[in-house]
Amino acid sequence: MNIKNYINGEFLSPINENYIDNYNPSIGEVYGTIPNSTKEDVALAYKAASDAFPEWSNKTLEDRSRILIRISELLEANLERFANAEAKDNGKPVSLASVVDIPRSASNFRFFANAITQFSSESHESIGLGAVNFTLRQPIGVVGCISPWNLPLYLFTWKIAPAIAAGNCVVAKPSEVTPMTAYLLGEICNEAGLPKGVLNIVHGLGQTTGQAIIEHPEVKAISFTGGTATGAHIARTAAPMFKKLSLELGGKNPNVIFADSDYDKMLTTTVRSSFANQGQICLCGSRIFVEESIYEQFKKDFVKKVSELKIGNPFDNDTNVGALVSKQHLEKVKSYIDIAENEGGRILYGGNRVVVEGSENGYYLQPTIIEVGDNKCVLNQEEIFGPVVTLMSFKTDKEALLLANDVKYGLSATLWTNNLNRTMQFSKQLNTGIVWVNTWMLRDLRTPFGGQKASGVGREGGFEALRFFTEPKNICIKYE
Ligand code: NDP
């Protein structure tokens, strides 16, 4: 399967005819190629977007909305094809892609198709001065959207949908590791009648293709999701050019469990919040803190439940844990497990690579639970982004809060308790962009999404995204 760039509604080879291998991580083999695009390809995509902008930004909201809804319907109609493609490209269980990744990608388009028809701006009457101000919210122009490999289409469309709903035209780059569903999206956009050039998808390496997008002088805003180091690099490059920036970065999220929580519900959800998508979700609760009185019981029950997870080929129906996304990532995750003992950790479960029958070269790793004694250890301070969680006990609310906040990241936190006062105290004092209480990853697309500290700058979701993708302009009218 040879992927092409999607520029001006057409599928084009890269100008230099240079390609990169695309791997199927579940069998560890190359199954296609993707363009190794250069800045010339990005320039072509920019030109197409810029040419499309005047007409697209002047389309009625209803017309834009109708096209986005159509994209969402076509994604739903092609769910199986997209879910299979995502599982093959990423290694995630197809059962997960079918109920999470692809339905959510369709929801992203439907949500912003509706949201744009409800979006409004403010007016301020300057009483006594004989003036009225109103805010125009205009599309920015050509914007860049760059996304990672863990939720490939889900995160790609989470940016593209609000950008185009707001009237912008887009140059987008998916991760080079998981380009397939972004490629297929181009076909859907054509079928849905999205005008040529409104969305342009350029494939290639972050350091070249991605870099060409962020340093393009006329790309006015960058919406980026990925690692913290890449985010910092993007900020260094784009901020002096005064581009608008939305940065959704890494996480090292605490999962704080109190003895008064609903134990069974907590246990089941904690297995999911630890290992869903092989732990490769920025929102996974990778640092688990458990109140001392239930710590030993939790440890026993958690290890038992995790040991029942089936690791296997993403296309087997009973697979709970699929393959990691790449050999390089597998080695990175494994390197953290290998230093566990030096870091004062004790592996309670897992830690080893798994050979799956029929997929012997795939990148499989056991879900791994490590007990640690100190939150300052590397395992608790660095983002591993794989099927690895740590366990620690705590005695008091104060201690739990300190542990939860004692990390450079601040994306999300999960709290398990039935105590209302504690819920409010923690919710107010946790330094994260999202707090889930007695649940995990329950998403309402209207809510602000994003992190504090090294987890990013800005918020996606709901009207926050539409505000990001529009430029506010105040009009002040004086009257007699
Ligand atoms: P990376 O930061 O390596 O890459 C993210 C994207 O940026 C990829 O498309 C990558 O391309 C591209 N990129 C890399 N270098 C540059 C550059 N110089 N200029 C422009 N683009 C560039 O992250 P990963 O793909 O490894 O994703 C994992 C990370 O994403 C984790 O840290 C995770 O926490 C975070 N994440 C955050 C989320 C959030 O909402 N806060 C959600 C999901 C993930 P290529 O892949 O081709 O190198």
Image: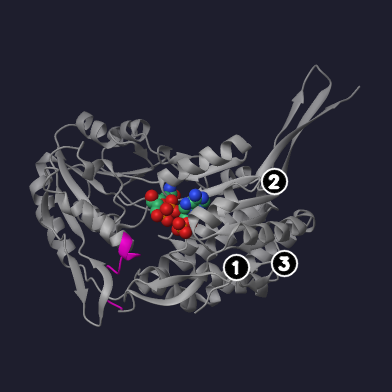
Secondary structure beneath label 2: loop
Sort mark 1 into few (<14), some (14-19) or many (20+) by Cα contacts within 10 Å.
few
In the drawing, does residue 356 fall left or right of residue 73? left
Residue 451 within the segment the image draws in magenta? no
Magenta segment, which residues? 317-328
Image quarter (top left, top right, bottom left or bottom right) of the C terminus: top right
Q: Which mark is drawn over residue 304?
A: none
Q: In the rendered image, is residue 125 in sight?
A: yes
User: In this view of the protein, which residue sits in the foreground, 297 or 186?
Assistant: 186
Q: What residue is drawn where x is 63% and y is 46%?
A: 469
**Alpha carbon of mark 3 to alpha carbon of mark 2: how far?**
18 Å
Q: Which residue is mark 2?
A: 140
**Alpha carbon of mark 1 to alpha carbon of mark 3: how far?**
23 Å
Q: Which mark is drawn over residue 16?
A: 1
34 is higher (above) or lower (below) than 243:
below
Secondary structure beneath label 1: loop
Query: For residue 333, which quarter of the picture?
Result: bottom left
